[in-house]
Amino acid sequence: MSLIIAKNLSKTYHSGEIEVHALKSLSFEIKPGSFISFIGPSGSGKTTLLNLIGCLDKPTSGSLKVANVLTSDLTRREAAAFRGENLGFIFQDFNLIPVLTVFENVEYPLLIVQNVPARKRRERVISLLDKVGMKDQMNKFPDQISGGQKQRVAVARALVSNPRLVLADEPTANLDSKTAFMVIDIMKKMRDEFGVTFLFSTHDPKIVGEVETLFTLEDGMLSSRLDGEGGNND
Amino acid sequence: MIKLFKIAIRNLIRYKRRALLTSTMVAIGVLFVLVFIAASGSFKNLMIGEITDSMLGHIQVHKRGYMASIDSLPLTLNLNAKAIKKLEIAIKEIPEIEAYSPRIKFGGMFSNFVESSNIKVNGVYPEKEIASIPLFLSRISKGERVIKKGEILIPELLATGLKIKVRDAVVIIATNRDGSVNGKQFKVGGIIKSVTGPGGRDGYVHIEDAMEILRMDKLEISEVAVRVKDFSKLDSVKTSLNRMLSKNLNKQGKPVFDVRTWEKLSPFYNIARMIDVMTIFIKIMLIAIVLISITNVMIMAVYERIREIGTIAAIGTMPEKILSLFLIEGLSLGVTGVIVGNLLAFIVVFLMNIIEITFNFGRQTGFILAPELKAGDILFVSAVVIIVSVLAALQPAFKASKMEPVEALRHV
């Protein structure tokens, strides 16, 4: 049973009178528990595809099923609820809420989105912060920690609501190599522990070697799919 | 909800200077409005008290048509003995009435045997007049503070103009309702200050002396001044009195009596209304200050946090929670301004009462302003400011809640 099923997925933007075909009839399936990366040059459609899978945008044509839900048909509110229940996000710029502490940033999805009781919230947040090595820093604000630490907090925040899929757009772009590998390592460990699917886009060839399935996008089309650790030819 | 408040407060603290400036503007607005309401209310109450307690009374009853011809003080429109009896019965049946004073008013010529001038004479029962108009005696600036038979209290204006002193002899000449001219000599018992300004020409004599000048066999009165026990119940007392007297009809089938409160008798009522209108305008200015300053600060807050809004929306925050977050920020700015403004208003009003600011009105001097903050005004102003604060944040908050996360996350 696939977690994501995309059929003839297309996305066209209108820039004035010019039509930009960001994605052209993509079809693919992704199994639960995968650790997948989309690579490709700038403008190849990686971010657009992640936005569609993340219910942040809608396809122009084609269908997209995520966790058995036809997400291309969801209303704005339904999409928000779906994201809150099933998806986690990791951003290139970390996007932590600056007025909240590390603990509160991770707690946010459980508190504001899922209304989890306080005790359970605390247990879950501390456990995750412990796993990403940020428990000691939990009372600090985002401007008091480093970029790598911020991204570890972002990983914890993405996982705290027990999502089925975590989407990460260039999660290591703003990190040095050592920290980037550390973050990828944490993400893989989390995948192994929680069985959650990680799907991310990257430019970084060193990180590509860490993924299990690698999709290459060119001009809005899937040009190749490589499976196996480091992306062996399918 | 508590967590949303916490986030909202922290977001405000993030931009300390801006939040401080906006709250200060709201606080100054609240302070200004409350102090103005307290001071103008005090001024208004002092003036109303001065006018009603020194001259008019709270309510006056006349024969219908008298007020239309009041400039000529027509004796033909006096209330006769039968009407007086009915009026007294009605007054005594209303427990909220504290006192009443019948008056005979007529115009006459006033002479010191060397010069003469015109005068408005009020014939009164001294005890009833003092009970109905408790500040009456305080208007007597020279002489004994009583009205004795054979004596007259003359207005300051005439005393000065005709160089008359207390105990001088004067004569009043008047025409009665039959057209005969009569005169009577009086001793000046005192000089009386005017309430309404330098134009006052009202003199006071005992009612029996007035009857003698006008050669009245039976008492006929021009007006009755009524004092109520509780000024806040003025309108209900007037309604009760009107209802009881409205049964008395004249030959044309119209009511005999004309009942009016001080508002319909004194031009100061228009000044009092002007104060009320000014208060309304000042409240509108406060609303504008709150609306503009909070809308401005919230628009900036939304614009600066577009990516943050995109992030929380992407995480799955529902649009109504994003709306609430920004509304709470507006609300918090308003509440802070209200609390600080109220505290400052208490301090300023307290200091004004200690300093005892005095002012003059007409020829009256030394009124002490005693501003008082009323719970109703505080609640009203606070509620308006808080509601307007939330309304001011509504448009920016709505904009934030309607943002597409994908667009917001793309924002640089």
Image (cartoon, rainbow, N blue to C red):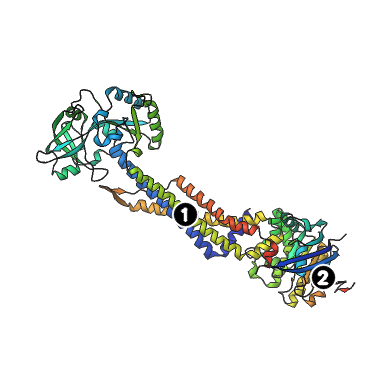
Query: In the picture provided, is A232 more to the left or to the right than B154?
Result: right
Q: Position of residue B77 (x, y in %)?
A: 27, 29
Identified at 16% across, 43% down, the residue is B159
Task: Determine if residue A84 is in view.
Answer: yes
Query: In the picture provided, is B215 more to the left or to the right than A168?
Result: left
Closest to the observer, B69 or A197 = B69
Instruction: Name the chain letter of the residue that bears numbered label 1.
Output: B
User: What is the three-letter code of the residue carrying label 1?
Assistant: Leu
Whether A198 is drawn above or below B229: the answer is below
Label 2: few (<14), some (14–19) or many (≥20) C-alpha neighbours in 10 Å: many
Q: Residue furthest left?
A: B114
| SS state under label 1 | helix
Q: Look at mark 2 in the image and give the residue it sits on.
A: A221
Q: Look at mark 1 in the image and give the residue it sits on.
A: B286
Considering the image in quadrants, where does the C terminus of chain B appear?
bottom right
Identified at 44% across, 54% down, the residue is B31
**Numbered disc in front, either 2 or 1:** 2
Label 1: few (<14), some (14–19) or many (≥20) C-alpha neighbours in 10 Å: many
Q: Position of residue A16 (x, y in %)?
A: 69, 68
Closest to the observer, B131 or B310 = B310
Quarter of the rendering containing residue B185: top left
User: What is the three-letter code of the residue carrying label 2?
Assistant: Met
Whether A98 is drawn above or below A178: the answer is above
Query: In the picture provided, is A107 more to the left or to the right than B163?
Result: right
